[in-house]
Structures are given as C-alpha cells and as structure tokens.
Image (spheres, grey):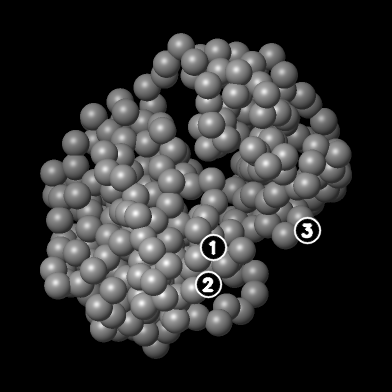
Amino acid sequence: MNYFDDEREQVFSELEKANSIVIFGHKNPDGDCVGSVLGMKHALKTLFPSKKVYAVGTHPAYLPVSEESDDVSDDVIENSLALMVDLSDLDRVEDQRILKAPKIVCIDHHMKQYDVPFAIVRDEKAPSATFIIAKCLLLRYGKIPSAECAKYLYMGLVTDSGRFQYDAEPETLEVASKLVSYGVDYKSMYNALYRQSSIDLKYRSIIYQNFKFDGLVTYCCIDKKTYQALGLTQNDAGGKVNLLSMLDNHPMWAFFTEQDDGTIRVELRSNGKYNVQKVAAQFNGGGHLAASGCKLDNFDKVQVVIDALNQTESI
C-alpha cells in the first residue's frame, strides 16, 4: 500500500508544522499503545528538537518503561496538535481531554468501523501501530530517529504480534530486524516482558482453575476482588486472554475482567478462522478479525457474548 497517500501525507505534514504536540493512547493500554506513544514522542523530539512534545497516559507495570508520563495542563492541550495512536475511536482515548485539542490526527491498525473527522494513517493489515510508525519513519525520513524510539517501537511490535506468533510475515520481520539494528537489547526486553513473579503465577493458577468451555469457546471471568487481593491493578489483570488459546476443539477464547468502575473489559480471540471482530462490534467494540475487544456494563451479558461467538460462522 502507499503509506503516503493524501490523508497520510496530511498526518505527517500536520506533525511537522505543529509547534506543540500531545500524544494520546487508549484505555487499558498495552505494549503497542505505550510503544506507539513513547516511540512517537522520541521520534518527534529527535527529528524536531525545537518542538514541544508530550506523552500522556498510564503504563502497565509489566512493561519495561523507565519514564513517566508527562503532566500536561489543559492549556497546553488547548494549544497543541493531538496525535492519537493505536485507536481511532475518541470514546476509547484514556485521557478525554483530547477533546480540548483544536486539531487531531491519528495512526491506527484496527479495522475501520465508521468515518472519522480527522486525518488518519490506517493500515488494517499491519501487525501493530508501532509497525506503521516504524515504516512511516523509514519511508519519510530514511531512519529510525533514535535508539529510544527503536526500543519502544520494537516493544509494541513484539507484544502485539505475540512474539511473532500471530504475524511473522517477511515485512514484519524486516522491520523488527531494522529496529534491532538501532541497538535494541531484545534479550533484556524479552526477560522484562515475560518474566513471572510469584503473584503472576498465583494469578495464572486462578485463571486455570476457573476457565470454562461453552461450545467453540474457552472463557474466564475475573472480578476485581480477585485480582485486587493479589495487589494487581485492572491493567495488570487484563491482557491474559491468550492463556486460554488454542485448546483442542475450541477455536475461540475470551477473557472478561471487571474494571475498577464495575464495567467489564472483554478480550476476544480466535485461531483466524472465526471473525471475532463482528462479535465485538455488536457490543460497540472493535479490533481485528482474530483479536478484538469491547466493554460490558456488568457480568450479566457474558453469556450473550459467548452465544454470539458460538453463532459465528467459520471463514
């Protein structure tokens, strides 16, 4: 695909023109979200030293991130270009002050659900938003601007591709190799990302003791009292859906985590032969064919989601 058609050109032109930029990610941020936010921050600050560039949003404890989010005032946002990464749904932005920004641009790899009122770089076939960012930087500037930028982009790519289990296409591996060439210590990163504490092991044991089968689906529900008793946050507790993956005769799997506000974070996955994105869309969610998510008001609709998954026809 042409990464610099008119709309994509507009995104980078706006970034190059802006004197002040605030970068936003989504609720329940994962490695790709945080990697995109921080990767773009370091890229822009290195390419354009005179610009003011801020990154807002939380960082899950399991990610090897050594820097804090920026403390940004409303006044700064009101006088900055907003860049949203790894999503294109304004309702899912973690810091809703993005609505105060005079202009928004976007970089995302999730399926288009509706037209958006801002310029966007979107590649639905990309394994991660960080992949799109890396590719755009290489095409437009001929380089990854800094080692820190490369580190965070690699973190996003390796986590969203499941350590290249979900996407090992030649171009994906080429981009990964290019990022590593900038000095990414991938061995240390893997150790940091995939190490386990005793609390992690206890939490996994709870999941394995409580998962259920229903038709084609393996699923598990975790309430907030369970993970809070272990000292985990809602961000730490979510993202465990793939512990239930690829069980015999169960081509779809789902994970339901109660959030601090009582709503339910829903993560849906499949072996690629079932489109879980269509199910997520029924509940105002979205994502990819084999990896999507949505939110429920409470646990009462879990069975409705499971039934919808079981009614999904194979591709």
Q: Residue at x 27, y 60 (%)?
A: 41
In the displayed structure, does residue 80 sit left or right of residue 144? right
Q: Mark 2 points at which residue?
A: 99
Q: Kindly state the secondary structure of the residue where label 1 is placed.
A: helix
Q: In which quarter of the image is residue 89?
A: bottom right
Which three-letter amino acid code belongs to the residue tagged 3?
Answer: Gln
Q: Kindly state the secondary structure of the residue where label 2 is placed.
A: helix
Query: Looking at the image, which residue sits at the far bottom?
Result: 6
The foreground one among 130 and 228 is: 228
In the displayed structure, does residue 226 sit left or right of residue 8? right
The foreground one among 263 and 175 is: 263
Task: Determine which of the numbered discs, if any, sits on residue 96 in the image.
Answer: 1
Task: Find out whether the residues at labels 1 and 2 contact each other: C-beta distance under 8 Å.
Answer: yes
Task: Determine which of the numbered discs, if any, sits on residue 282 in the image.
Answer: 3
Q: Quadrant of residue 237?
A: top right
| Quadrant into which the C terminus falls | bottom right
